[in-house]
């Protein structure tokens, strides 16, 4: 049976590519993109679009009823760096949008929910290397606190009300189609743009700040595969650890030099250094691998080749 999908926050870094991929898979007319702003041409011209505020419950409900939506992917959020500047706005957006979608599922108006969490759920007391699925969390950022709370609520709605909600803790995502939206790992996208434009980059993190990262194609594949596995395979209803690769700014600069030998990097750490220092440097994603077969495909050098190749076009 054909299903109808709504993506909320579809014009962002992940939403744009996710919408296009879902449209290829389920048919353009069956995948409704929505956001508070219009998106890029490839998104706007490939299927239906609604201007929609994720914090307005009745507006979201109207769209769900109008299109007879079965599944929602909730991608609207305020990201880590921006959320430190606007704590209350971040909390309101990140939490209320999630409650609206979870409540629609509780009321059986939709049957399945995808909501992304982040490595920001971890904090300074978390083991940094190969951070396990279940460990000390204690996030120290506004964004991390909202993601940690969101995870608890997802698990609660699943246990108490049988809501089929699925989630992954995305690492920093690297992509070329859309610019990133105000996160701490944005440097790993900016650096490719600057390498091609100026041959140099001033990094807002220190040279040895190693963080978990992933190429966008892997992230989209993970998201759609998790949503497609039978419900009984999804044992974790808070959010799955998801590993791609781990590297620091120096590593990415070396990878770029293989294509642009004169490329140079300098370091001017700002407030984002403290956020990055509170996060893991690598992730253990054993449950995702065992329970629904997760396997990343892109390493750093493959990502660099894809980024430079596509941005040059
Ligand atoms: N990009 C990453 O590296 C990363 C890493 C971990 C987790 N995540 C999570 O993935 C999700 C998507 O992230 P992204 O990088 O695509 O973010 P983004 O900032 O690029 O996109 C978010 C989109 O939400 C929209 N939006 C903002 N407020 C809205 C509202 N009230 N109603 C409707 N739409 C609204 C924005 O216009 C934007 O298009 C977020 O939950 C984010 O926390 C992202």
Image: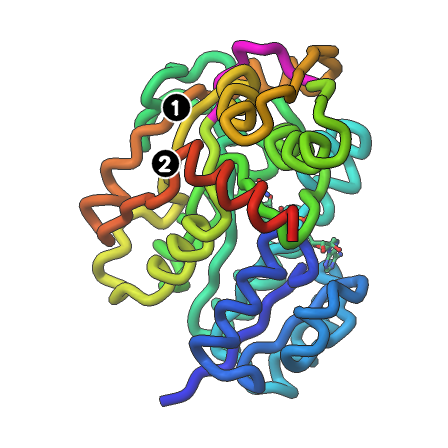
The secondary structure type at the circle numbered 1 is loop
Residue at left offset 64%, top offset 81%: 47
Quadrant position of residue 98? bottom right
Determine the main secondary structure of the stretch shown in magenta.
loop
* Residue 148 appears in view: no
Mark 2 — residue?
243
**First to last magenta residue range:** 204-211
Residue 61 % position (x, y): 66, 75
Magenta region includes residue 208: yes
Label 2, residues with CA under 10 Å away: few <14, some 14-19, many ≥20: many
**Quadrant of image for the N terminus:** bottom left
| Residue farthest to the front, as pictured | 261
Q: Under 8 Å from ligand 1: the CB of mark 2?
A: no
74 lies left or right of 237: right
The secondary structure type at the circle numbered 2 is loop
215 up-or-down from 191: above or below: below
Q: State if disc 2 and disc 1 touch (CB < 8 Å).
A: yes
Tag shown at residue 154 = none
Residue at left offset 51%, top offset 13%: 124
Mark 1 — residue?
282
Q: Nearer the viewer, residue 283 or 20?
A: 20
Residue at left offset 34%, top offset 60%: 225
Q: CA distance from mark 1 to mark 2?
A: 8 Å
Q: Nearer the viewer, residue 147 or 30?
A: 30
Q: Nearer the viewer, residue 48 or 262?
A: 262
Magenta region includes residue 100: no
Residue 130 % position (x, y): 32, 22
Quadrant position of residue 212? top left
* Residue 286 appears in view: yes
């Amino acid at each position: 049976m054909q299903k109808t999908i709504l993506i909320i926050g579809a014009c962002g870094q992940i939403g744009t590519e996710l919408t296009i991929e879902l449209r290829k898979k389920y048919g353009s007319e069956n995948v409704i993109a929505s956001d508070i702003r219009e998106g890029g041409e490839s998104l706007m011209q490939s299927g239906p679009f609604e201007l929609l505020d994720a914090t307005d419950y009745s507006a979201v409900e109207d769209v769900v009823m109008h299109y007879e939506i079965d599944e929602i992917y909730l991608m609207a959020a305020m990201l880590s760096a921006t959320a430190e500047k606007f704590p209350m706005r971040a909390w309101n957006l990140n939490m209320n949008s999630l409650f609206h979608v979870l409540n629609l599922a509780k009321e059986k108006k939709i049957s399945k929910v995808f909501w992304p969490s982040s490595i920001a759920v971890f904090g300074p007391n978390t083991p940094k290397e190969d951070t396990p699925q279940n460990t000390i969390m204690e996030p120290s950022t506004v964004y991390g606190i909202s993601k940690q709370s969101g995870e608890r609520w997802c698990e609660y709605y699943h246990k108490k009300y049988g809501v089929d909600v699925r989630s992954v803790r995305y690492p920093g995502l690297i992509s070329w189609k859309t610019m990133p939206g105000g996160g701490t790992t944005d440097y790993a996208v900016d650096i490719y743009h600057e390498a091609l434009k100026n041959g140099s980059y001033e990094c807002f993190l220190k040279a040895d700040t190693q963080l978990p990262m992933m190429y966008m194609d892997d992230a989209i594949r993970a998201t759609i595969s998790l949503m497609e596995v039978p419900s009984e395979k999804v044992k974790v209803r808070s959010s799955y650890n998801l590993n791609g690769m781990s590297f620091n700014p120096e590593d990415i600069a070396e990878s770029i030099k293989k294509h642009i030998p004169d490329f140079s990097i300098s370091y001017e750490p700002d407030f984002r250094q403290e956020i990055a220092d509170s996060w893991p440097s690598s992730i253990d994603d054993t449950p995702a691998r065992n329970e629904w077969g997760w396997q990343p495909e892109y390493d750093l050098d493959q990502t660099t080749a894809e980024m430079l190749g596509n941005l040059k076009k």
